[in-house]
């Protein structure tokens, strides 16, 4: 279970806007297997609802689930002409009816949840033959958003799982094999681009919830050292025009409920 305090820190919408294109790819992956129109779809760990709102615009009947009510409130403000049922709940324990959905999606959301409980809940929610599609970060060799944390504070405590494990095909297959068929993993590269070095630093210190949370829990001198490490790591990725730009790997996983 993720803490709502973490995800309400900073300004999550700044993150959501930058990964909205991946949410569209997740929905496209569903539509390769079934049209979304008139489908009952649940968006798990939906944040401010990028995938949920787009799915509703494509004609699906959508339920958006997130543990953080502040993010759902932001999503509800963006509904426009679409209709989404917003539910505050843990993505791995939604309380929603069994076998009530034809599709489940998540954009960089469920990968942060303990996987055994999360898979069991998805399997419970989906009807036989339903489609699962979600995005995940993939472990890379150079990530200025993550490497400075490890270099400065050390590796995070081992919880037995990490978000980028879903980017490993063998791990994903092993986790899904008991309940899902036709597992597909499509890899890509996501570009993080900022108009200036200052904008990239502001994203880390004031907007990205995970970074804001980490910086808020670190004592003063260590916090200064971490900010300096972020500063140095980002400068390596200057685009030569005053901005910052770098690519990180991700993947979209699709599977069919047995």
Image: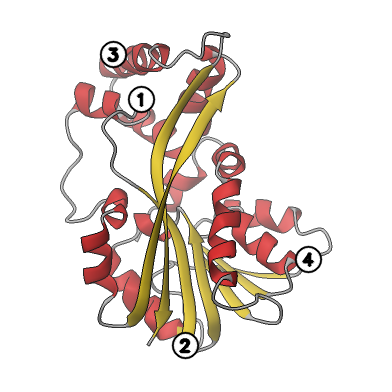
Q: Nearer the viewer, residue 14 or 40?
A: 40
Query: Tag 3 or tag 1, which sits nearer the N-term?
Result: 1
Q: Which residue is mark 3?
A: 225
Query: Tag 1 or tag 2, which sits nearer the N-term?
Result: 2
Residue 46: percent from the left, percent from the top? 54, 59
Q: Is residue 49 visible?
A: no
- The residue that appears at 37% across and 77% down in the rendered structure is 182
Q: Which residue is mark 2?
A: 129
Q: Which residue is mark 1?
A: 144
- Is 6 located above or below residue 68 in the figure? above
Residue 253: percent from the left, percent from the top? 41, 63
Q: Residues within 10 Å of mark 3 (few under 14, many from 20)?
A: some
Q: Nearer the viewer, residue 96 or 218?
A: 96
Q: Which residue is mark 4?
A: 82
Query: Tag 4 or tag 1, which sits nearer the N-term?
Result: 4
Q: Is residue 248 visible?
A: yes
Residue 90: quadrant of the picture? bottom left
- Is 128 located above or below residue 184 in the figure? below
- The residue that appears at 31% across and 53% down in the rendered structure is 167
Question: Which image quadrant: the C terminus?
Answer: bottom left
Q: Residues within 10 Å of mark 4 (few under 14, many from 20)?
A: some
Taking the image as shown, residue 224 lies to the left or right of residue 41, namely left
Marks 1 and 4 sit apart, C-alpha to C-alpha, by: 37 Å
């Amino acid at each position: 279970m993720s803490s709502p305090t973490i995800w309400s820190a900073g300004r999550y919408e700044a993150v959501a806007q930058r990964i909205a294109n991946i949410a569209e790819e997740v929905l496209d992956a569903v539509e390769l297997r079934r049209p979304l129109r008139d489908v009952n779809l649940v968006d798990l760990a939906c944040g401010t609802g990028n995938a949920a709102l787009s799915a509703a615009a494509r004609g699906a009947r959508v339920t958006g689930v997130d543990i953080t009510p502040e993010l759902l409130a932001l999503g509800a403000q963006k509904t426009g002409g679409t209709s989404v049922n917003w539910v505050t709940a843990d993505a791995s324990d939604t309380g929603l009816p069994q076998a009530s959905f034809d599709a489940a999606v998540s954009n960089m959301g469920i990968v942060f949840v303990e996987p055994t409980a999360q898979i069991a809940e998805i399997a419970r929610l989906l009807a036989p033959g339903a489609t699962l599609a979600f995005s995940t970060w993939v472990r890379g060799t150079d990530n200025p958003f993550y490497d400075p944390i490890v270099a400065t504070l050390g590796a995070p405590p081992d919880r037995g799982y990490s978000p980028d494990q879903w980017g490993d095909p063998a791990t994903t297959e092993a986790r899904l094999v008991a309940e899902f068929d036709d597992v597909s993993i499509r890899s890509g590269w996501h570009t993080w681009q900022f108009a200036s070095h200052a904008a990239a630093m502001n994203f880390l210190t004031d907007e990205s919830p995970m970074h804001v949370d980490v910086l808020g829990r670190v004592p003063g001198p260590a916090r200064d050292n971490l900010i300096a490490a972020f500063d140095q790591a980002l400068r390596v990725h200057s685009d030569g025009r005053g901005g910052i730009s770098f690519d990180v790997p991700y993947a979209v996983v699709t599977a069919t409920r047995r």
